[in-house]
Image (cartoon, helix red, strand yellow):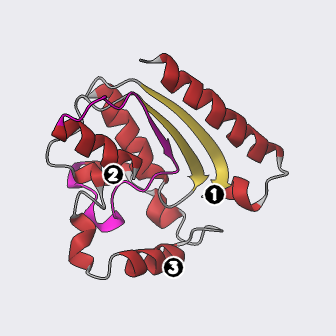
Amino acid sequence: MTAVVSHLWRDEGLKPAITGAHLMIPALCYHSHIPEQYKSDYKSWAQNKDAPILSEKACALFMDSYIPNPEDFKNPLFSPFLFPTGRKSLPPSYFQVCGMDPLRDEALIFERLLREEDGVKTKLDVYPGLPHGYWSIAPTLKASQRFVDDSVKGVEWLLQQS
């Protein structure tokens, strides 16, 4: 939702401008609609199809519940990676990405494009080997505390960008 709102806000020229986007384990593009030129970097859907918490089957359950018409999976309001107006002039963006998440690579690709091609300031924290939303399932893990601490630091970073 954050990525969609950032695009729409920018495109509509709404004020005040959004000064930062916190993209926590974001869903940015339905897996079957990843643009061809990025497919070689998009391995997480297959690698993590049986991941705990968010598996391929769980993703299908959510997607089918939210978007009953599969044709709508390519709609930029569902897959903001595909926004026709591109990514330029989006606000600084902070990403938190889990390594054992089917959504991992769409976030990593999107962050890289923002930073390298569009000149958007980004901050990225990656949690290798950990599944989507792990900190909410196992809040007493040290890794969960790190995720929460990083969230606070990431928002602080976003506030410093304006």
- Residue in view at x 70 percent, y 41 percent: 148
User: In the image, which is nearer the foreground, mark 1 or mark 3?
Assistant: 1
Q: Earlier in the sequence, mark 1 or mark 3?
A: 3
Q: CA distance from mark 1 to mark 3?
A: 16 Å
Q: CA distance from mark 2 to mark 3?
A: 23 Å
Q: Residue furthest left?
A: 84
- Residue in view at x 52 percent, y 33 percent: 124
Q: Which residue is mark 2?
A: 40
Q: Position of residue 58 (x, y in %)?
A: 53, 76
Q: Which residue is mark 3?
A: 57
Label 1 SS: loop
- Residue in view at x 26 percent, y 40 percent: 9
Left or right: residue 121 versus residue 133 is: left
**Dominant secondary structure of the magenta stretch?**
loop
Q: Earlier in the sequence, mark 2 or mark 1?
A: 2
Q: Residue furthest right?
A: 140
Q: Looking at this view, is 19 or 85 the one in front?
A: 19
Label 3 SS: helix
Q: Which residues are magenta?
A: 13-37
- Locate residue 20: give its quadrant: top left
Q: Which residue is mark 1?
A: 133
Is the Cβ of the residue at disc 2 closer than 8 Å to that at disc 3? no
Is the residue 2 above or below the residue 18 in the image? below
Q: CA distance from mark 2 to mark 1?
A: 25 Å
